[in-house]
Image (tube, grey):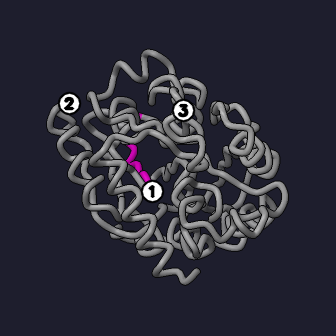
Amino acid sequence: MKDDDIKKAVREGYSRIATQGDSCCGPETSCGCGSSADTFSKVMGYTDSDLGAIPEGANLGLGCGNPIALASLKEGEVVLDLGSGAGIDCFLAAAVVGKTGKVIGVDMTPAMLEKARENARKGDFGNVEFRLGEIEHMPVADNSIDVIISNCVINLSPDKKQVFNEAYRVLKPGGRIMVSDIVLLKELPDEIRNSIDAYVGCVAGADTKDNYLAAIESAGFTDIKIVGELSTRGMWSSVDDTDANQEIDTITSSISSLKVSATKP
């Protein structure tokens, strides 16, 4: 698939999620299988307190971790969220960095931005702003960010090396990243690798774990650490369909949810 086709498909897919409220980030066959966004997010590491502190509609259940819980944010820091969606991680970060800090969410889907901005107005989050842009070309100045977070988004990019190069560019010296993402433990079958639906579902675009970590290192980051790893079998509920469950087993034995931190020297 061409890069432009992938981006178009992802943008269209997440536009539908923004407008229809579909809370599935997984294989198409597992979508709509009964788990609410809040239930799914608790499996990913969010607490009842987290979910109660954000505006209604900010959680679409699209993550594969909780980067805020691991980012060690400090009051006054400037935080950038790559692929901010409806704003859940931005709002949680905003509460930690306080009024002297700032949170910037970047998303390439206009419908998501509209939803996030409305959520910010509802919650009166004056220290959060959302910008339209691609994570391969971040609409952010050089050396201006203290912390970058991202939650199950970089895997969607067809050029992950460029994403991490951009992350390095916009971070201040000493700045850090904390990302939750999907990586491959082994190659996916061709029918899944070539599926647009699987791309939108955070699966087909994933790179191998080794390549993902190598992309972070090649961008110039140091102190790269895996701070958590989760089998994705628990991420998606089984459906009452033998063929579908076999497909899910094939996928989930091949991928992992990885939490990675790194620092710009």
Give the CA separation, mark 3 to mark 1. Answer: 27 Å
Q: Nearer the viewer, residue 198 or 139?
A: 198
Task: Give the quarter of the image for residue 246.
Answer: top right
Look at the picture and state if 62 lies above or below 57.
below
Magenta residues: mostly which secondary structure? strand
Within 10 angstroms of label 3, few (less than 14), some, or many (20 or more) residues? few
Q: Can residue 262 be seen in this snapshot?
A: yes
Residue 127 relative to residue 17: left or right = left
Nearer the N terminus, badge 2 or badge 3? 3
Within 10 angstroms of label 2, few (less than 14), some, or many (20 or more) residues? some
Look at the picture and state if 214 lies above or below 91.
below
Instruction: Check the image and name the residue furthest to the right.
Output: 186
**Is label 2 in contact with label 3 (beta carbons under 8 Å)?**
no
Name the residue tied to disc 3.
33
Instruction: Work out which quarter of the rendered image holds the C terminus and state it.
Output: bottom right
Q: Where's residue 162, x and y in %?
A: 56, 76
Residue 247 relative to residue 58: left or right = right
Q: Residue at x 69, y 44 (%)?
A: 244
Task: Give the quarter of the image for residue 252.
Answer: top right
Give the CA separation, mark 2 to mark 1. Answer: 21 Å
Q: Which residues are magenta?
A: 75-82
Instruction: Work out which quarter of the rendered image holds the N terminus and state it.
Output: bottom right
Residue 243 relative to residue 44: left or right = right
* Mark identifier at residue 123: 2
